[in-house]
């Protein structure tokens, strides 16, 4: 069956046989677009290298933006932490200032009390001194006994005076003692206030220094955030320009592909107009091999390219779809006639993954199907085949000669 199908694909069976199989009916020939636009040159449009350069510039800037955004996130977190620390230090500073102010007020009150006590003590000392002086003048140099004997009538008065003097002396002594105590209390209060104020003053200085350092750190952290934000904004602006440039370059490149190779041309296309049919990894190559399913030696008709199911399969060159449907061991299968005796085949397409129809013109790099594992396959891959003048050939060497490295 595969042999018959191959002859159908190559257009070698009689017309009656072809008519009996509508899936492989011969379409109206479509010429490759290059023949109709000979005046256009590849140099009139950006090359794939230009597209890659634009993509790389955009990608590099994107990576840089991502790095800066990550750094910005770290800096923002650090700035928030620094600001929080500054607030904690500010609270501590405020509390230290509040305690200092309260103690300063208390110190002022104590100092006022001490000053009043000192004043009272001085007044008491003066009063006691005056009383002592008065007693000395009143009774100084007089014999009290003689006075009482010579002035018997005034004895009672004299005794009263003595009692009064005695009271004055005691009062003077009491005032003096109170003055001494007031002075001691005043000094004690002053000393206590001075010590407490000194302690609080030191705490206030430390708290103020800690707040100043924390505030400085917060300011610097925020400055770093602001600078990095500005840098990120500049890079975002550059990225926007580079993205526009990349998009414009790619659009012009694709216009050039269409102008040179016909509608549908896309992606990376070599100077000779050929494209990699898959971006996967090369597996079994062209030639005899021991079949993994049938366990016999048989010809492996193409190059297997491993790729995840559902990923795109691209047309290798501009041409016309000659077959699109089920094809025995190759499962869902497409062949494209590129003219000049060259036909390419694409096997194991996933169910529903054929994206073109018989007779459709395709361009190089056009998405024509999706990778699958239909037919005789053990995993998802593309089975890529090349016929030259009706004979199978090694796809790797064929494509390399046309500027394409398969699986690259």
Image: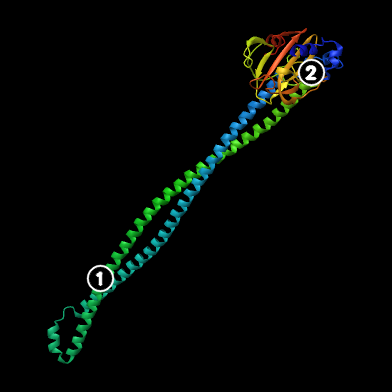
Say which of 19 and 147 sits in front.
19
Q: Position of residue 330 (x, y in %)?
A: 71, 18
Q: Tell me the quadrant of the picture where the C terminus can be found.
A: top right
Q: Which residue is mark 1?
A: 177
Residue 323 numbered tag:
2
Q: Is residue 381 left or right of residue 39?
A: left
Indicate the quadrant where residue 406 lies. Answer: top right
Q: In this orientation, does residue 30 appear?
A: no
Task: Give the CA distance from mark 2 to mark 1.
Answer: 129 Å
Q: Tell me the quadrant of the picture where the N terminus can be found.
A: top right
Q: In this orientation, does residue 14 appear?
A: yes
Indicate the quadrant where residue 72 lies. Answer: top right
Kindly check if marks 2 and 1 are in contact, taking CB atoms under 8 A apart as contact.
no
Q: Position of residue 137 (x, y in %)?
A: 22, 78
**Which mark lies nearer to you, 2 or 1?**
2
Q: Position of residue 209 (x, y in %)?
A: 44, 46
Indicate the quadrant where residue 196 lies. Answer: bottom left
Kind of element beneath mark 2: strand
């Amino acid at each position: 069956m595969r042999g018959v199908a191959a002859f159908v694909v190559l257009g070698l069976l009689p017309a009656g046989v072809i008519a009996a199989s509508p899936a492989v009916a011969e379409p109206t020939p479509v010429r490759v677009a290059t023949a109709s636009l000979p005046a256009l040159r590849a140099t009139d449009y950006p090359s794939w290298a230009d597209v890659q350069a634009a993509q790389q510039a955009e990608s590099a800037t994107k990576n840089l933006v991502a790095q800066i955004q990550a750094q910005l996130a770290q800096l923002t977190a650090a700035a928030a932490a620094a600001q929080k620390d500054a607030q904690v230090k500010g609270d501590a500073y405020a509390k230290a200032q509040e305690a200092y102010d309260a103690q300063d007020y208390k110190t002022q009150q104590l100092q006022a009390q001490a000053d009043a006590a000192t004043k009272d003590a001085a007044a008491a000392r003066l009063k006691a001194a005056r009383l002592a002086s008065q007693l000395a003048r009143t009774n100084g140099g007089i014999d009290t006994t003689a006075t009482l004997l010579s002035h018997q009538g005034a004895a009672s008065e004299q005794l009263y005076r003595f009692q009064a003097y005695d009271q004055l002396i005691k009062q003077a002594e009491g005032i003096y003692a109170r003055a001494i105590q007031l002075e001691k209390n005043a000094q004690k209060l002053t000393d206590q206030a001075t010590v407490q104020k000194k302690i609080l003053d030191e705490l206030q200085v430390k708290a103020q220094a800690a707040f100043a350092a924390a505030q400085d750190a917060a300011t610097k952290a925020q400055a770093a955030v602001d600078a990095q934000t500005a840098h990120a904004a500049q890079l975002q602006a550059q990225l926007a320009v580079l993205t526009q440039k990349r998009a414009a370059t790619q659009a012009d490149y694709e216009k050039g592909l269409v102008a040179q190779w016909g509608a549908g041309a896309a992606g990376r296309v070599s100077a000779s107009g050929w494209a990699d049919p898959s971006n996967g990894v090369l597996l079994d190559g062209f030639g005899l091999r021991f079949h993994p399913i049938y366990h016999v030696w048989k010809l492996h008709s193409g190059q297997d390219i491993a790729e995840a199911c559902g990923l795109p399969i691209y047309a290798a060159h501009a041409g016309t779809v000659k077959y699109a449907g089920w094809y025995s061991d190759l499962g869902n299968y497409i062949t494209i006639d590129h003219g000049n005796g060259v036909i390419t085949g694409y096997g194991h397409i996933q169910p529903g993954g054929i994206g073109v129809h018989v007779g459709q013109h395709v361009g190089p790099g056009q998405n024509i199907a999706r990778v699958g594992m239909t037919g005789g396959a053990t995993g998802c891959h593309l089975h890529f085949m090349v016929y030259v003048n009706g004979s199978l050939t090694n796809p790797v060497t064929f494509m390399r000669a046309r500027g394409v490295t398969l699986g690259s």
